[in-house]
Amino acid sequence: KTEIDEKSIDLASQKILQKAEEEGIETAWDRYEKQLPQCSFGQLGVCCRNCNMGPCRIDPFGEGAQKGICGATADIIVARNFLRMIAAGAAAHSDHARDAVLTFKKMSEGEAGSYRIKDEAKLLSLASEYGIPSDGKSLEEIAANLADVLLQEFGKQDGHLQCTKRVPKSRLKLWAELGIEPRGIDREIVECMHRTHIGVDNDAVHILLQGLRTGISDGWGGSMIATDVQDILFGTPQPRKSTVNLGVLSRDKVNVIVHGHEPILSEMIVEAAEDPELLKLAEEKGAAGINVIGICCTGNETLMRHGIPIAGNFLQQELAVITGAVEAMVVDVQCIMPSLGELTGCYHTKFISTSPKADFPNTVRMEFHEDRAYETAKEIVRTAVENFPNRIPEKVTIPEEKQECMAGFSAEAILNALGGSPDPLIEAITGGAVRGIGAVVGCNNVKIKHNYGHVNLVKELIKNNVLVVTTGCNAIACAEAGLLLPEASEMAGDGLKAVCKALGIPPVLHMGSCVDISRILVLASAIANRLGVDISDLPAAGAAPEWMSEKAVSIGAYVVSSGVFTVLGTIPAVLGSQAVTSLLTGGLNDVVRASFAVEPDPLKAADLMLEHIDEKRKALGLN
Ligand code: NFS
Ligand code: SF4
């Protein structure tokens, strides 16, 4: 049995894991143990269920079957499985984006009364980017036109995505030459499903090129649209302080957790929690107030825009409930463990599902629609408040650990901090004070000690003067470890420390949720354009030390396609094919001038990134 201090590096999490053990409550780590040993065919990616003659599996030792019934080889099966992961990940980001645009459109038509245009400047600049004339039009008209153009990006039947305009010219040209310039967002995903049907695309390289194109349609398409539209509707993030970790749960207030991914819902919950009527009700129920807190990327969204505290990242969702102090766990879509159904039943917690797309065991359904957004949010918060008296004091343990952090570094905010142009950062890089940029992102995964990969990789990078930009569950891990504070520059190398002190910024910049990796692309593009080079020429590298989701695979596909070398901390299910493995970890360099590496040890992963950064510095004539 795994010891608690082998499960997580985080003290608060360890305390709650201890509580779980004492109460006989099961968590993801226990279920992982019951899965061991995991199926090696699955691990290697050589199992196919794409038709009902199967399942077929290839014997990795070369003794048994080497082909599926249809004749598919390990290369074909592995590549197809990988493509389906990319398709699912791109679908998740892009379907989220579609809902954001649909809300935006309804808002512009006056049918989503609770939403407003919060960032006019961003609306106008986006409209001009998409060639929408704005003279003489009301903001609502401009918004409606923009929404229509953005919606077309999803269902486009001919031509390429307009959103790739922000890509450096040389990169766009490369994609065109390779035939991987993305077309309609939905089309790429559908085509993945078509190609992986039995008897369609049966060449590993050909299949993987479609994977790159689909990834690009996510990163520079769906995800970027989600970020842009959410900024217009809810405001572009600016630096602000907050607190993270399980200690943000309140002893005397009603705790409402928002978990999932779409700020469309959580924005309204944040507002509803300030409603005087509900605050009065909370008082009547004996609570000192209403405490909204986030988990996962919904948490990142509300942290970035409102400084709402975060209780934890992916592997802390169960732990939050086990504190016994959560009145309502409110969820929408993605990365929500179905185990929460049974788990919330062990406490007084109401598990409230809100998305028309996503239900879970044992939830209270409170479906969320834009036309009644605020009303529904109020009903949800009211349910939480009314549940407060049911809290069982003997079952409550809230760890005292909480950590201050600074978040809100949108690309706009970073440029602001730099005085309006990327030049000071570029000078710091060319002058050598900052060695390069590390983009560290992604999930938690029970295969790696919780937050161990994240925190150690990032610490090693900043120690070596690499400025880190972060999103998703990595950002939350960094926040919990105190890395998102200007004071954390004390842990940085001398060059980076001096730059951070001069600008008053942390050495690790929280840029948002996972769809906000688009912000990193925009920043990278701005720097590359300023230097007159491609993104692949920049002294920059990416990493996903504890990734697990299909979304992360799509992200990997677009980050590498954009020219950024990326180190994965957990092994993707591709090792069953020598061809696919060597393409992903080497051959891609000749295609998109970047590739993947796999390295579970965070310190070694940091070394790989540093080596890459130094090579790029040398090629640019920097030392
Ligand atoms: Ni990203 Fe965010 Fe976390 Fe992974 Fe899930 S919450 S969208 S997928 S687990 S980083
Ligand atoms: Fe087997 Fe081919 Fe069917 Fe896959 S598609 S299950 S390899 S027969």
Image: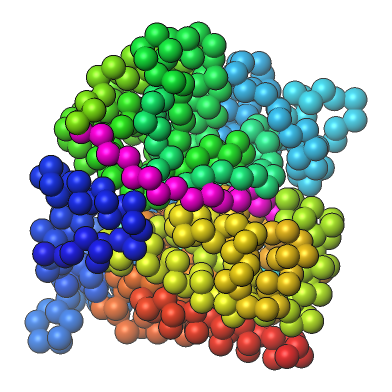
Residue 125: where, in percent of width, then height?
80, 42
Which stretch is magenta?
Answer: 395-411
Q: Residue at point 45% right, 66% down? A: 455
Would residue 411 be seen by someone viewing this image from the given angle? yes
Q: How are the residues colored?
A: rainbow
Judge by depth and name the residue closer to the eye, 431 or 252: 252
Residue 184: where, in percent of width, then height?
57, 49
Residue 71 quadrant: bottom left
Judge by depth and name the residue closer to the eye, 144 or 252: 252
Is 588 one of the magenta-colored residues? no
Residue lying farthest to the right in this orientation? 135
On the rendered structure, is 174 left or right of 416? left
Residue 345 quadrant: top left
On the rendered structure, is 518 left or right of 553? right
Judge by depth and name the residue closer to the eye, 141 or 417: 417
Q: Residue at point 39% right, 19% down? A: 287
Residue 522 quadrant: bottom right
Residue 572: where, in percent of width, then height?
33, 70
Q: Residue at point 14% right, 50% down? A: 21
Is 406 one of the magenta-colored residues? yes
Q: Residue at point 50% right, 84% down? A: 607
